Image: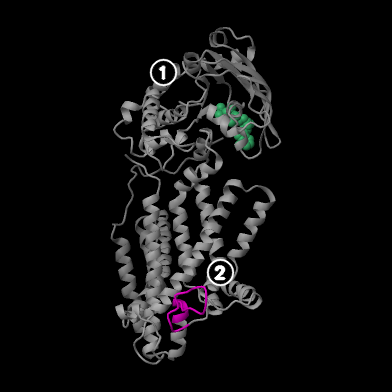
Amino acid sequence: MAKRIDVSGLNAYYGSFLAIEDISMTVEPRSVTAFIGPSGCGKSTFLRTLNRMHEVTPGGRVEGKVLLDDENLYGSGIDPVAVRREVGMVFQRPNPFPTMSVYDNVAAGLRLNGKYKKSELDDIVEKSLKGANLWNEVKDRLNKPGSGLSGGQQQRLCIARAIAVEPNVLLMDEPCSALDPISTLAIEDLIGELKERFTIVIVTHNMQQAARVSDRTAFFNLAAVGQPGKLIEIDDTERIFSNPSVQATEDYISGRFG
Amino acid sequence: MTHATLSPQRSSLRGATLPKWFAWAVAAGSVVAGLGISAAAGLHSDIQWALIAALLFVFGSYGISAKVEGRRQARDRTATSLVWVAFILAVIPLASLVWETLKRGVKVLDGYFLTHSMGVVADTEPGGGIYHAILGTLQQVGLATLISVPVGVLTAIYLVEYGRGRLAKAVTFFVDVMTGIPSIVAGLFILSLWILILDMGYSGFAGAMALSILMIPVVVRSTEEMLKLVPNELREASLALGVPKWRTILKVVLPTSIGGITTGIMLAIARITGETAPVLLLVWGTNFINSNPFSDPQASLPMYIYLQYANSGGYGAAYDRAWAAALTLIAFIMILNLVARGIARWKAPKTGR
Ligand SMILES: Nc1ncnc2c1ncn2[C@@H]1O[C@H](COP(=O)(O)OP(=O)(O)OP(=O)(O)O)[C@@H](O)[C@H]1O
Ligand SMILES: [Mg+2]
């Protein structure tokens, strides 16, 4: 079940360094939101505040509110482990568990969280691999190591692993940056299918990709190196790419397109 | 303003090269020349001709190669030959030690020797064996391992996965200090605490405690290094799935590094197996089989070697037994190392289809 994300007045620090400042936005359920912006402006940092992964970094600290439907993720008594089960994440570099087989990788989130019957697990693994468009390629090597797959297959394996635990929101940090155009296309198609069930947020440096897959686009920027990154604007993707309301957005996008 | 013109280069990328067997030929030539020179000069020591040969080899290959191939290749060859000389210098003592021990040790090493104690055999008589010492060593080292591995591995996990701030710094500092403790000091510490203050008797367990003082820092250090090698991405991948931190450590971090951790533990075991000083102070020694490590003196291999040698005067039955026991000890440690390598290879994260 997809959920709405409502961020208000969010600051994130690394030690005493303020990486992103005063970010507020709403992400609608069953939609794809793309984050674009220059390197170092805090897209990854912001993404990681949405499932409380930011505080895993030494010195990582967050101020402000992130509402998931109506619950503040940073409210008192909220268990970060429970948050991460609701808000899944796919990383820039594919990172399957090297000691586990393809099957175990997909089942990892479930198995590490509790007891499941073998038949139940079989079903979920098959469903997730199909959901990640990987089933046909790996169905006869489920017990081989996950790190033996190609980079693109590994990335889809990581997506299967993330959707196997049935999160409400799926965060993707440049999921295609290490992939070839065909794997990229496979993952973009996949994002189109996944948005029926999940709320999806994707960071990308590829403008065409943002334009292709997302419903809404958020542009981040930073005034100068060492300054905190800020949200410049968020709007429907079509508007951002045709007629943005802020000049900086237009400069960034047109600079990219040449 | 004019630019300095580059000196004309040879048009081909191919320069004169010496054949592959060149290095071997020079090495053989140097050995022959070294032997010849030392014979002519009436030198008797093996070390002298070997040094002459090594020098001839290094300078000879430089000279010839500089003439034929040019200076850069010659320098390259010099570096390579220095590496080889250093390697051989390092291997010679090791090989001769193993060879010497084998030669002297096999004399009395047989099934009887491994399965009998020294119970009714006087030091000067032939016969007897090391069963009691093997038993004692296995029990003492086993107990030390049982104490050190949980303490060491958990400490390393704390330092790598949880440790921040003062406490972690203090623990690291103490581990460093412990690494440098001489084994005799560890023995004296347990002696004063366990035997003098608490008034317990000599026992294998007392020795095991001292051995674990020596073993814990080694285990902590090697485990720490292995845990640090586990990429952070794996931890984050697991945490992002909503797996609690302790399960992440147990199910993702440890399995990924278990091969290296096991190797480290095996090497630590190998290191303490040969310790004599704490055993001498705390376990004492006996000629009889004592299968209870918690009370009364026990034998152990290093102690046995020392006592047999000390009582032999340099020849005779006891002297042979000392060498045979030394051979057993070396074999035991080598087997441990091989097992460690086997486990490391077997448990290494798998790649390929
Ligand atoms: N672990 C860290 N410790 C300290 N500072 C960090 C850390 N990670 C990121 N930063 C800083 O935070 C700021 C935002 O980094 P972030 O990784 O979020 O940028 P990004 O927008 O994702 O960039 P890119 O597009 O290159 O991935 C940068 O100034 C960066 O130097
Ligand atoms: Mg980033």
Q: Is residue A57 magenta?
A: no
Give amino acid for label 1: Asp
Q: What is the x, y in percent for residue A235?
A: 59, 11
**Most frequent secondary structure within the magenta stretch:** loop
**Mark 1 falls within which chain?**
A
Q: Provide the secondary structure element on which disc 1 rests.
A: helix
Mark number for residue B209?
2
Give amino acid for label 2: Met
Q: What is the x, y in percent for residue B251?
A: 47, 44
Q: Provide the secondary structure element on which disc 2 rests.
A: helix
Left or right of B38, for residue B163: right
Badge 1 crowding class, 10 Å Cα cut-off, few under 14, some 14 to 19, many 20 or more, is some
Residue that badge 1 annotates: A189
Labels 2, 1: one chain: no
Farthest residue toward the right? A16
Label 2, label 1: how far apart the Cα atoms are: 62 Å
Q: Nearer the viewer, residue B131 or B107?
A: B131
How many numbered marks appear? Answer: 2
Quadrant of the rendered structure where residue B311 is? bottom left
- The CB of the residue at mark 2 lies under 8 Å from ligand 1: no
Residue drawn at x 43%, y 52% as measured from the top left: B259
Q: What is the x, y in percent for residue A144?
A: 33, 39
